[in-house]
Amino acid sequence: MTITKKVLMLPGDGIGPEVMRQVQRVMDWMAKKRDINFDVTEGLIGGASIDAHNNPLTDETLADAMAADAVLLGAVGGPKWDNIPFDIKPERGLLKIRKEMGLFANLRPALVFDALVGASTLKEDVVKGLNIMILRELTGGIYFGQPRGVEERDGVRFGFNTLVYSEPEIERIARVAFDMAMKRNKRMCSVDKANVLESTVLWREVVERVAKEFPEVELSHMYVDNASMQLVRNPKQFDVMVTTNMFGDILSDCAAMLTGSLGMLPSASLGAADETGARKALYEPVHGSAPDIAGQDLANPLATLLSFAMMLRYSFDMGDDATMIETAVQNVLKGGLRTADIMQPGMAKVSTTVMGEAVINELNKLV
């Protein structure tokens, strides 16, 4: 029986459309070889939506996102839109879709493929075998707290933001993190700044309370400044890390570069489970829109393909198919093919299109 899943594709800006085309090729392959069809709707977000509608996320696109089984996004932003009003900048569309879909848990794996150990700027013994999962709280904290703004007080301008978390917000991200740790190596590090910030004093208290429900998980705490140092000193000490919105934004990018290239890393943003167990979810590569290489068939599509694999695993319960795509990516890298961002001496430099074709060829061998 053919399985059909409803997917909203948001290619976005810069290299987004190019890398998304390679996902469409894998979807087409799955329809032929795996009897799995994807009912794909394509929409605009970010700069592309601004150009068409003067709005980074229209109500129509948001409605399509809410109706989809999952959303796959390319990238948003670029210098073209640097000088437009703040409230309609491309990134506002991304923040809005996360907020409206209730996507509070951002999953950012930092995984070093054996074939790419040499691409990291860290020593091989530090990063070989690295496999960290960072969970970033995505809809609260200082990025969304009120009050916020820029105002004049007695002739002096002040900029201000509010870092605020409620117990339920902390509890739900902690529970997702503990669930993830149970499926991995049963170790979790909660990152905060409880020696300075009252909001993360509460964060630590709630995480410790939730920990009682998961006695098998070894829980540790670390201040964010130490965590940033430890990520480059001894990253393999970590398994699952959970932290606030802003800290997670910073630490996950730091962890990403341990792997050698942002072009290799996927991410998932998940909402709360409904009565059937289904969650709203958005999947996107960690890399940005890379406007300097957009339209040149140079971008690395592997992070987007791995994001699609995360979609199969977390939204559609298709773990075998997800593993097959991940294995195909590993085999392509073992075979020596590289896009420019991960190019190494003695390897073959290829285009976006050729890299996508190579993944399809490996899938044909695996099926």
Image (cartoon, rainbow, N blue to C red):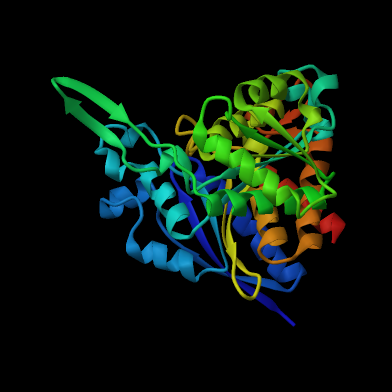
- Residue positioned most to the left: 155
In this rendering, the count of numbered labels is 0
Report which quarter residue 355 is drawn in: top right
Residue at image x 29%, y 52%? 55
Q: Quadrant of the C terminus?
A: bottom right
The residue most toward the bottom is: 1
As drawn, 315 above or below 287: below
Among the 4 quarters of the image, the one containing residue 78 = top left
- Where is residue 101 drawn, in percent x and y? 48, 60
**In the displayed structure, does residue 328 sit left or right of residue 146?**
right
Foreground of the two, 279 or 158? 158
Q: Is residue 33 above or below residue 361?
A: below
Residue 105 lies left or right of residue 13; in this view the side is right
> Considering depth in this image, is 142 or 234 the residue closer to the camera?
142
Q: Look at the picture and state if 119 lies above or below 2.
A: above
Describe residue 255's horizontal placement relative to residue 50 as left or right: right
Task: Report x, y in % for residue 308.
Answer: 65, 54
**Which residue occupies 25% across, 31% down?**
150
Residue visible at 70% across and 71% down in the picture = 36
Would you say residue 298 is visible in this rendering? Answer: no
**Horizontal and vertical percent position of residue 287:** 56, 37
Rendering coords of residue 318 (x, y %)? 75, 65
Asked whether, in this view, residue 251 is left or right of residue 123, the answer is: left
23 or 136, nearer to the observer? 136
- Residue in view at x 69 percent, y 59 percent: 314
Front residue (pair 269, 297): 269
Residue 68 in view (yes/no): yes
